[in-house]
Amino acid sequence: MNQTASGIGSALVERDLLRGLERLWQGQFSPDYVWKAELALRAFLISDRLFVSNLTEISNIYEEGIRRAFAHAVAVGKPLLEYEQPFGDWILDNEFVNPRELHPFRNLPEAEKASLDEFVDRQMEVKVRSILPRWITTTAQAEVFLSAWYNGVALRDCEHAARFQTDDDDETESHPLPSEYWRSFWKGDELIWSPVTSTFSRSDAAYLVGCHRAGLLVFADSPVARICEEHVFAKWPSRLFELLGEELGRLSRLISGPDIAFALPPLLSLVMSRAPEREAIPNIIVAVRDEYASARKELWALLDEMWNAKSFATQVKILRSLESAASSIVPAAFRGSVNALELAIGVASVSLSDTARTLLAHDAPIGRVSAVSFARKLSRDLRKFLENNRTILRRHLSVSERRQFGFD
């Protein structure tokens, strides 16, 4: 069953990202939550309608009654997840469509679903092999580590949980890992540990891709979501934030002192710069979201034109305009001033062509970024509001939180 009309211009947001974002004002914010908060802010800025994901965390893999809430369960109108508001407040919750309402979703054809299953299985096995510590010796430890990792827990915390795992902590029997475990996850015809390579990852991928096929922009940071983001999902509008982050990150590294160990990403920096105190951050998010309403509508119209243009040449032309605007956000925001004396000398010596080239080079980023109103507004806001990382973190974070970012 396919749900509702096209989701173009709307976003599906993973609950784990929202939990990371709310630590900004609730406390215990650390580098582990920076990327989650940045992704959540992207959703608020770029999307007209926001839907919260129907996926829950995986629980004990041996408890048959506890499973994730998958998209096909939502499609038949009987979701497994008890719907909760994204934040449980009266501020940001109002920005989301009621979680009880069905969001856009499109069932995948059987051939695509089979191909996706096979692809995700391969990708997940490679990933699991690369992250599972060699010191793990029992299936119970492997289960604890991989379940935590699959749920978005930082790797060091996954190891911490697995090290304290004992047979008494698990109702199921824990077996030593065979020596061939590191060469293959199979022992004969029996899969040693299956959820991240089959049941959960396949269902999650079908859900996320089904949402994407219906037009939703998916914001998530789970292992499966990262695979889909890299290999399946459309590159725009996420590409805009990627180019912005690369350029601002490059500039931040050049101007940072030796005592700064961490650089905040663009949208997180912008929102925190505008908030006078951490308790005000939810209201700032709503205000910024409202300010970008018309700009994001124009951006989505431009993207729709690129995706649906009959001519490939037209599609490439729009793409180049988008790429150029996104790459120019930071240069346009922090451009230098033209040296007036230099220009005067140039004019006096009749080197008008050189003078014109100087002016054109100075104004080029502004011209490129102005072609896309969303990029132009981002550029202006960065110039107007952006503070340095030290100022931002000192105003909003406690001493213990700041130490995790490398300074007091």
Image (cartoon, rainbow, N blue to C red):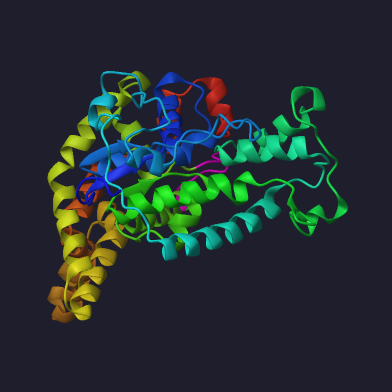
The quarter of the displayed image where residue 382 is located: top left
* Residue 203 seen anywhere in this rendered image of the structure: yes
Left or right: 197 as drawn, with respect to 229? right
Give the main secondary structure of the magenta stretch.
loop
What is the span of residues highlighted in magenta in the rendered image? 254-262
Residue closest to the eye, 214 or 250? 214
Q: What percent of the width, then of the height, locates residue 372?
A: 18, 58
Q: What percent of the width, then of the height, locates residue 191?
A: 72, 51
Residue closest to the eye, 167 or 145? 167
Residue 290 part of the magenta segment? no
The quarter of the displayed image where residue 97 is located: top left
Q: Residue at x 38, y 33 (%)?
A: 79
- The quadrant the C terminus occupies is top right
Left or right: 31 as drawn, with respect to 300? right
Q: Residue at x 74, y 25 (%)?
A: 171
Residue closest to the eye, 117 or 282? 117
153 in relation to 398, above or below: below
Q: What percent of the width, then of the height, locates residue 148?
A: 62, 35
Residue 259 part of the magenta segment? yes
276 in relation to 261, above or below: above
Q: What percent of the width, then of the height, locates residue 376?
A: 19, 53
* Residue 395 seen anywhere in this rendered image of the structure: no
Residue closest to the eye, 86 or 273? 86
Q: Residue at x 23, y 26 (%)?
A: 94
